[in-house]
Amino acid sequence: MTSPVVSVRGLRRAFGEQQVLDGLDLDIADGEFVAMLGRSGSGKSTLLRILAGLDNQVEGSVVVPKSRAVVFQSPRLLPWRRTLANVTFALPDGGPDSPSRTARGRAALDEVGLADKDRAWPLSLSGGEAQRVSLARALVREPDLLLLDEPFGALDALTRLKMYRLLHDLWARRHMAVLHVTHDVDEAILLADRVVVLSEGRVSLDRRVDLSFPRSRGDEGFDDLRRVLLAELGVKEEVGHDLSR
């Protein structure tokens, strides 16, 4: 069996008296797409920051690949740099205008459908376009692990659907491992191989999504899995009220 690209054992993280992660275990296989759900304060974003190397005040064992990248809910683009310069900003090789950096940046923009926006300023972009640039900035590093912290939470419903398709296509082409933190149960089911739920600092549910791609909310088995996940999150659907709409 192939070793997991992410292996977490007994992970603990406290902020003062508050124990946010409490003995968490998690594996993610190479090329696997895992969505993570949980109530606010359950430790989802804390775990993602630890895996990204942004927080090392922890107890336990954390094994992650060296090559990893993060996309946050806010695109966090530098307003004084054009789109292409934002994408290539963190590349380590060559100077800011080196041919290799420029070529890689243009290729990443093309991959997210923004080849014609390489000279645009961030403030001229729509919310969806800005998030595509943020995704290109992550992809240009060719990560083995892509970490997503609610990247579509601030987008309108139609733009989110377009981003779902884009993310799935990118994942299918690149075969990278993905950990996608979200509050949206439907989003998790539509995109992921597995869905894990965090509760009280641990994984309380780990469920494989046995639905073929492309997926829709009308697929057989979608509602059953949705009800299981909502119940684990402590949410009960009312008769005649669809929480996904």
Image (cartoon, rainbow, N blue to C red):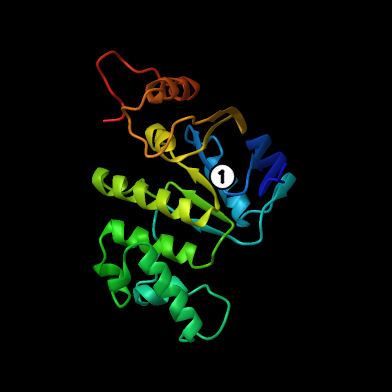
Q: Residue furthest top?
A: 239
- Residue 136, position in %: x, y? 42, 64
- Above or below residue 13? Residue 77 is below
- Residue 163, position in %: x, y? 34, 50
Nearer to the camera, 180 or 17:
180
**Residue drawn 29% across the image and 57% down it:** 127
- Residue 213, position in %: x, y? 41, 39
User: In this view of the protein, can residue 16 be seen by the observer?
Assistant: no
Which residue position holds label 1?
32
Quick one: quadrant of the N terminus? top right
- Above or below residue 129? Residue 178 is above
- Above or below residue 92? Residue 23 is above
User: In this view of the protein, can residue 2 be seen by the observer?
Assistant: yes
Left or right position of 60 against 191? right
**Residue drawn 66% across the image and 40% down it:** 27
**Residue drawn 26% across the image and 43% down it:** 157
Q: Which image quarter: residue 223? A: top left
User: What amino acid is at disc 1?
Assistant: Glu
Left or right position of 143 against 130? right
Q: Secondary structure at mark 1?
A: loop
